[in-house]
Amino acid sequence: MVMEGSLRVIAVTITLFLWLLTIHPNFSTSESEVRCIESDRHALLKFKQDLKDPSNRLASWTAAPEEDCCDWAGVLCHNRTGHVLELHLRTFRPLYDDLRTDLQWHTQYKVYQRSRFGGKINPSLLDLKHLIYLDLSCNNFHGAQIPKFLGSMGSLRYLNLSFAGFGGLIPHQLGNLSNLQYLNLEGYYNNLHVMNLHWLSGLPSLQHLDMSGVNLSKASDWLQMTNKLPSLIELRLSFCDLSGSIPLLILGSINFSSLTTLDLSSNRFENTSILFWVFGLHNLVSLDLSSNWFQGPITVHLQNLTSLRHLDLSENIFSTIPNWLYSFSHLEFLSLHLNYLQGTISSAIGNLTSAISIDLSENELEGKVPRSLGNLCKLRKIGLFSNKLSQEISELLESLSRCVSNGLEILGLSSNKLSGHLTDELGQFKNLVILSLGHNSISGPIPWSIGNLSSLRLLNLETNQINRTLPQSFGQLSKLEYLYIGLNKLEGVVSELHFANLMRLTTLVASRNQLKLEVGNNWIPPFQLNSLILESWNLGPRFPLWICSQKHLQNLDISNTRVSDAIPLSFWNLSSQFIYLNISHNQIYGEIPQIPLIFSTPSILDMGSNHFKGPLPCISSNLSYLDISNNLLSGSIFHFLCYKMNESKNMKFLNLGKKILSGKISNCWMKWQSLLALNLGNNNFSGAIPASIGSLINLRSLHLYNNRFSGKFPLLKNCRDLFTIDIGENEFVGSIPLWIGHRLSRLKILSLRSNNFLGQIPKELCTLTSLQILDLSHNKLLGSIPKCVNNFNTMARNSNSNDPIFLFGWSTKSSSMPFESALLVIKGKVLEYSTILQLVKSIDLSKNNLSGEIPTEVISLQGLQSLNLSFNILKGRIPENIGVMGALESIDFSVNQLSGQVPQSMSSLTFLSHLNLSNNNLIGKIPSSTQLQSFSASSFSGNKLCGPPLIDDCSIDDVKPNTKNKGSSGGREVDWFYVSLTLGFVVGFWVVWGPLLMNKQWRIMYFQFLDRMGYKLGMFWHKLDSFYLNVVRFLSCY
């Protein structure tokens, strides 16, 4: 019996061994004796010759005879025969997910780009007769066509060419691969295309087909041909330009009996009735119809797909969640994010008992999160961010703290209307990996129990009203990588204990709180950060030296942190790793080192509003944004502009304003053609603007105000993208060029104030239909105001956008885009407008020699807020219908020769808060209105007006002097000394002042002369005062 049992065991063992050999041909016990076939080895070496391998990944592929090709990287051989069976030459792309910042992803993507294979595919692959697996995915073959000879590799069962950089027409020869089971041609949108899919009929064994990104717009047979693949299990046709209807004859023959996975996302079907055939695929387990612009309610026919485990209907225009959808008790993954879903979430959501992930984010859902959601014990992800949910956060956490809290890994509730306090129940969610509650109205302190979230990798509490101190239990979150707590009301001290165990922390964004960091002078943090954003903390007064220990830091913002110290050289040596560096609005002093600040990639550097002194530094050509404004830097700009003139600069934004730079502007702008915004304002530059500045063809914003530039208007004909020109307060001469109207059609802001421009206002300016601010004041312009001002279309309508005028954008987690600013004189005050500049509409032509009448066409500018025509020689009447300019807040027509009455319609200007009509020839009664009577009498003085707010109320006649002769009072002797003295005074007075009193035009010109002299004296004393302050600051540094 024992012998018989032993024989049975041996028999079973032999049978099992033979079975393994049958199903696993590679199985062998003597693999050490098998070497690579020589012909296969030579084929691989030929293949390598035409392949570009920038990171030397195929270093093991050598021609040495003792080398076994079966040991080479990416090569898999048959264990018994030695034939090459598989080539794994994929380059792995970084995947974008919630736990990777844009910065980290871009860094990893660059590493991936440097490691991709390229070159050509050598036909020597045909010599690999036994090759069944070929993976060349995620490489870069630079748009080359897929080799036709691949269709002759008849042994292939697996072919993956996805994202390999192939382009053009897909060769029909691929249809000869009759043994193929897996084909992946996914690529970047529209790189590959087909005329038809007839060749698919030659692939009867195909089980997996992915042609996502291939242009199938001309393949009207796509459904018929894929339907003929009897073994097809998975079909992915995302981003294929599929659209239109499907013939009824075809619909009747659809029979994807084996299909379990279907992806038709990101096409242009628009109407779900086009996909009626899909709803008959009862074996479907996974269905992706996202990004197709489907509208209205979700089609009821989806409920026929009772086997579904994965349903993605995101990025469409569905309006409601149907109740029947909650009956899908087998559904594991449901995504409806980025639709227009409205209403509330039904409590029936608790019927989705198999749900692992539910994503309803980026919709318009209101109300509360149903308590029944807490009964879904398998839930790992809840995505509800960017809705209108309003609920106490404590109530919501309590409803989820039942069985959901045990397994929940992702909870996304940011950008809702959640309120109330976080409670200690938060500590029950111990498996949370991502907790996002940012952009709500949550208040109160952060509970100590947050330290219990031992699995937490990302925490987002930014932009709430969270207050009090940061609990030291943060130091227990040993797996935390990303922490966002900025824009709250946190206060108090943050110490080393708060960071005790945060070894994995890579991103800390905590700006705009009232927190103070107190750590030892020699503190070395346990983490190595990529991003550190501590704007508005108290880090000073000493520079935080611990930052110099962060060897991977790319994003740093310590602006407005009360640092009053010099920056150590060890910090400047980190410049090569920075992508974003902001140390502005501190009191940092000393010189910027003259070693070139090297930035390895297009980077942002903001050092504005500090006490840096000395010359401008040499800057890396990679820098894209530089702000060193409002410092004590001085000297010439030559070495800065002309540094490494053989290199083109990547600079897009350059702000050198508010310093004491001087001298002439160098003619070195030819290499700065990437510039979008240039600010040299508030310096002491002189001389003419060099011609090379006209080569800045991408320039959008130019600020040269308050310098001593001279010569004619800068030659900017080729800068057609300009929307701001501010060259005010300089010494430019000549006439305003006519080409401004013809060539700079995008201008929004034109400020030429306080120069010496003369001649007439060109009518060509009227072609600037986008103009919203025109300031030509304080010049020597004459002639009339052009009647074509009604062509200023932007001034004729109210602004419909509250967005600032952005200069350009960049993508960092910490920074915002720079926006345009301008100095404007409105309501008699000089103010700088920035964030609301897009709302301002203004015309200022004051203090010139303009004559004629105010054109009636000006009343069409009904979006105008400020109109200043003062100190000119304008005659005639104020336009009668000026009251239709309902947006006007400021009017100044003072010191002209205007006549007639104040228009009655002016009383309807309800927004008017500044009015000056003084020193004209206006007559009659001031119209009655609460608005006009609220101004002071000085607004109407120097005219022949009456009525409130003037003392003369128009009801009493002027008092006439008594001229009756009262006779002589007696014969006193005349004192001729006093008579001659009186006569001399009278004669002298009338000789000097008589012409001015009798001739109003002379009088106006005389007062304009006095005004200009006063203005220049004021500017002189202002600059003298600034010079004195800079001398004091300079001396205080010693």
Image (cartoon, grey):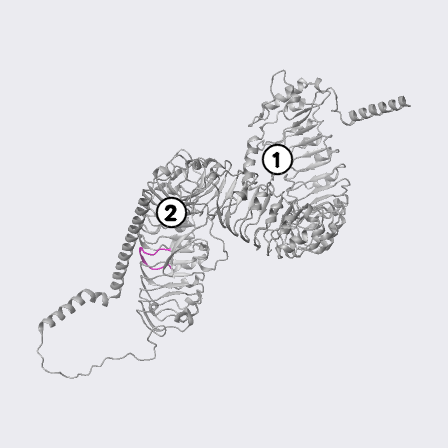
State left or right for residue 1012 relative to residue 914: left
Q: Residue 630 carries which label?
A: 2
Residue count near mark 1 (Cα–Cα under 10 Å), binned few <14, some 14–19, many ≥20: many
Q: How far apart are marks 1 and 2 (CA)?
A: 49 Å
Image quarter hosting the C terminus: top left
**Which is in the foreground here, disc 1 or disc 2?**
2
From what the image shows, is residue 197 above or below residue 374? above
Which of 856 and 129 lies nearest the eye of the viewer?
A: 129
Q: Give the range drawn in magenta.
A: 775-786
- Three-letter code for the amino acid on which mark 2 is drawn: Asn
State left or right for residue 802 relative to residue 49: left
Q: Is label 1 in contact with label 2 (beta carbons under 8 Å)?
A: no
Which of 659 and 722 lies nearest the eye of the viewer?
A: 659
From what the image shows, is residue 984 above or below residue 122? below
Give residue 294's position: percent from left, percent from top.
66, 51
Q: Can you identify the residue that label 1 sits on?
A: 163
Which of 297 and 307 lies nearest the eye of the viewer?
A: 307
Give residue 977's position: percent from left, percent from top.
9, 71
Whether residue 394 is in magenta: the answer is no
Residue count near mark 2 (Cα–Cα under 10 Å), binned few <14, some 14–19, many ≥20: many
